[in-house]
Amino acid sequence: MAKIKERGSTHIYKVKKIPPEEINGMTSLCIHEEPPYCNAACPIKLDVRGMMTAAGEGNFKKALQIYEKATPFPLLLSSMCEAPCEGKCKMCEVTEGIAIRDVEKAVAAYGERTLSGGVFRTKKKKKVAVMGDDLFCLFLAGELEKKMYPVTVFTSSKDMDTFLTANNAGMEKERLAGMDIDFVYGTEFSKELFEPFDVRCASEDVAKKLYPGAVCDEKLMFYDNEKLVMGCGEGVLNAAFSAKKAALSVDRLAQNLSPDNMRGDEGAVDTRLYTDISLASTEGKVVPSLTAYTKEEAVKEAGRCLKCHCDECMKSCVFLQNYEKFPCLIGREIYNNTQVIMGNHPLNTAMNSCTLCGQCKEVCPNGFDMATICQHARENMVTTDKMPLSQHEFALLDMYFSNEDAFLCEKQPGFDKCKYVFFPGCQASAVAPGTVVKAYEDLCSRVDGGVALMLGCCSVMAKWSGRDEIYDQQKAFIKGEMDKLGNPVVIAGCPMCKKELSSYCEVVGIWDILNEIGLPECAKGLEKPAALHDSCGARGDGETQSAIREIVGKLGIELVDIDCSGDRAPCCGYGGLTAYANKPLAKRITQKALERSDAPFITYCMSCRDRFAREGHEAHHILEMIYGTDAGSPPDISEKRYNRLSLKQNLLKNIWNKDYEMSKPEFEVEYTDEALQLMDDRFILKSDAEQVIAHAIESGEEIYDEESKLYISCARPGNVTFWVKYDKCDGRYIVHRAWSHRMLIQNREDF
């Protein structure tokens, strides 16, 4: 019978709504989408970063296309722009800021101009009149021409040359000639000229001449009394910005809408962006050899740009790198995944692949917490019966195994009540049982008041899986056992256990006790420098991190400096059950953590020690050095269970004089190396294979494969059907392969 009930159907109609403001509040902390400092300072929204990137690559055509999106007249703007972006350049904090205006000039000069026109450009029906002689009128005409409005410009200048010369805009004559704008020269301004047009626009001077007392609403560039779009202010950048606002007002008026309708953010804005400048070059500005940059000089100067962006989490988190999405985006997608009522849930694997380690929150300038989003999403999917059990069932069954078959709770011999209880954690018992024995014997001999022993799991696996009901049940079980002991102080051998048990017990780390009573005589450090890996469970726990470093110092170990330590340390790949839900990603996470140093790693979490050793990197748990033990090669999943049971048996026999017999199959089973590797990769235990063989013996249901000369049989002891391919030799069963699936295989008589 299945230990954990699988969801009943894939056709689920339940959904647990997450308030949009909750997810928006979380994702808004991500500043990746915030504009860079130069962009934010530019009122016309020029993508300075994009333009600098293209120019730095020598792609002046692309750079000019970016510039032309911001203004119809790049030569004019770049020649006289006040360049507020330069003062905001982040390079100013390192050396000289980027010469943005000079690069803009080069882009406007060397870039290949985008030709207007095309079969898909259709003129709009509403006609617009622009009356005046200044830069505002020129920029407004250009903006409206881009929007495909029929535009007529009335100017008092006698011809185009006079108009452009008066505005120092002669360099744009060629570009202006290619635009579909009608100019009427030598105009004597009057209201009557506006009559044939749908939308009326005028410069500030003309507006005040035609409508004395006209006042411009600078937000809308609009004089409401006469429904007139008008300009105001001086300077080329102000003219370009005013024209952009005015063009938007024309657009709204042409659609019979209010000018203030849906305008969005206009002008310069504040930005919350963070950019790491620690590795920025201190090289100063490129000095032009002539009066302006050559192409080569412009490329070099643009190449100094930092391309300001925030990717602190992406640099550290393999999970985010794997999905190639910044947390604000994948956070929203995971949220949307939880709200799907029927159909596929494509983000299930993604939300289950996060290690929930919390590193992102530490490295993010705003404290974005991807772990909380993924944890809540898992809980939501489980609650609504939309999370398949497959990705976490093995881990949950392993937790049950630790708290049932391998569970032990005993008082120190000679004590009716103990002041302490040693809780080494399920992974310590599975990976290094000899170290657990040495540690417990030492605590019993040197700690006053008695030390009980509890072998079990702190239940964090149920929490990580999002299955709150199981988590609460397991917590209640552990708390009940603590109550039986009289609620002693817990001596945790694992930082994650310390963190979990602290919610309902008084907990100290074994490292705290050892710093207090001193290290045993057998303690011995390494004779070569080592790197210290801080556990996810100790994130935010400065006392534990300091205590570990104090012990390392007492062991005489020289520590090498590594990136990302302390609260910023990466996960080893075990946290959040990633190692069960997404093994390839978990492997990459482990490898990323190991890239920090070639030196041996010291850990104080047994899972970290196990993960590092599996990648062939020398790793030692700090208790191994304290007690002179060596866990050896990493055990496979079956060996881990055997180690827990063997530890329980040995302790009961040698300390409490109690008998405990581990169950064994009634037949002899051997495994090929290939079978053992496959089973470990596929989370198939030896006990699973033995149940299949036992079922075949009892039922006689087996297939003989003529090609391989091997037998095949299957059994379904829970939610999984296991298949085993084996040979029979002198009463022995030799397993060659094993695989599993979750489909239910039924005999005909069962229908």
Image: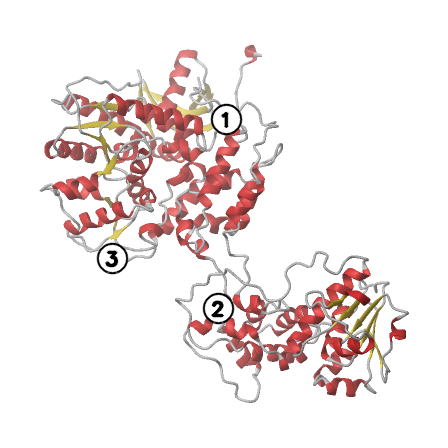
Whether label 3 touches label 2, CB < 8 Å:
no
Residue receiving disc 1: 742
Q: Residue at x 80, y 78 (%)?
A: 209
**Up/down of 361 relative to 627, above or below:** below
Label 1 and label 2: CA atoms lie apart by: 51 Å
Query: Which mark lies nearer to you, 1 or 2?
Result: 2
Label 2 element class: loop
N-term mark: 3 or 1: 3
Residue 325 left/right relative to 430: right
For this orientation, the residue located farthest to the top is 749
Label 3 and label 2: CA atoms lie apart by: 30 Å
Location of residue 150 in the rendering, given as x and y in whole percent from the top left corner: 84, 69
How would you rate the neighbour count of disc 3 (Cα within 10 Å): few for under 14, some for 14-19, many for 20 or more? Answer: few
- Which amino acid, by three-letter code, is at mark 1? Arg
Location of residue 321 in the rendering, given as x and y in whole percent from the top left corner: 47, 51
N-term mark: 3 or 2: 2
Location of residue 719 in the rendering, given as x and y in whole percent from the top left corner: 47, 23
Residue receiving disc 3: 560
